[in-house]
Image (cartoon, grey):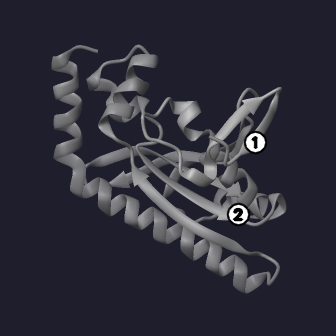
Amino acid sequence: MNESDRDDVLRQFSGRQKSLEVALASLKAYVESECTQLSAEDRDFQWRLVEGRVKHPDSAMGTLKKAESGPDELWDVVDDVIGVRAVVVSKQMAEKLRDRLDRADASPIKNRNSKTMFNEERGYRAIHVKGKLNTHDGEVGCEVQIRTELEDYWGVVTHSDLYQSPVAKPSFARSTRRGGVIKYGVG
């Protein structure tokens, strides 16, 4: 992508920032509500966290580049402009939440599809529910990641490796490979 394309993507995000933030708050509240209702219906269902983000324009540009698309295709190609992560205790609870989100009639997520994502090289695993979310400025791609606590901890450990982030890992999540074994808190 050239500088003109980058400016176009930044301009598009800037023009929709308010509606993207409102859509994020709405999706986050929806997922929290579904978790709360599941907890009320099933006392064994436990959830720990629901948080979200609007994708950074630089990351969206990376997605466009990988798809060999341009800024005019931004809102169609980037399928996770709005992202929410729900952390539950067990795999069975993650599947229950996925099933509930998949079957909900009143869901704000349109054209939903879900699948378990697994990166064999890094060991990353999570359920992803993807679809479209209406905003005041039109539809955008959204994603709800559902992880167990263990998957979430592993996601923290591997995130900078997966996305080659320049951000340092938190001290509790530092890892060093030695003889094929990962040791935590080293180095």
Position of residue 131 measured from the top left corner of the image (x, y, whole percent): 53, 45
Q: What residue type is labelled 1?
A: Lys
Instruction: Report the residue at 26% width, 24% height from top.
Output: 72
Q: Is residue 120 above or below residue 138?
A: above
Position of residue 169 measured from the top left corner of the image (x, y, whole percent): 53, 45
Position of residue 111 measured from the top left corner of the image (x, y, whole percent): 55, 46
Q: Nearer the viewer, residue 69 or 49?
A: 49
Mark 2 residue crowding within 10 angstroms, few (<14) / some (14–19) / many (20+): many
Instruction: Tell me where residue 21 sits by quadrant.
Output: bottom left
Instruction: Report the residue at 21% width, 20% height from top.
Output: 5
Tag shown at residue 94: none
Q: In this view, does 77 lie above or below 150?
A: above
Q: Tell me how far mark 2 sits from mark 1, CA to CA.
A: 32 Å
Does residue 54 show up? yes
Q: Mark 2 falls on what kind of element? A: helix
Mark 1 residue crowding within 10 angstroms, few (<14) / some (14–19) / many (20+): few
Instruction: Tell me where residue 187 sits by quadrant.
Output: top right
Q: Which amino acid does label 2 sit on?
A: Leu
The residue positioned farthest toward the front in the image shown: 187
Reading the image, the residue beneath label 2 is 97
Left or right: 59, with 46 as reference point: left
Q: Mark 1 falls on what kind of element? A: strand
Instruction: Report the residue at 29% width, 15% height from top.
Output: 1
Q: Mark 2 against mark 1, which lies toward the viewer?
A: 1
Does residue 119 show up? no
Reading the image, the residue beneath label 1 is 183
Q: Which of 131 and 89 is in front in this view?
A: 89
- Label count reads 2
Instruction: Report the residue at 46% width, 62% height from top.
Output: 27
Mark found first going from the N terminus, 2 or 1: 2
Left or right: 44, with 60 as reference point: right
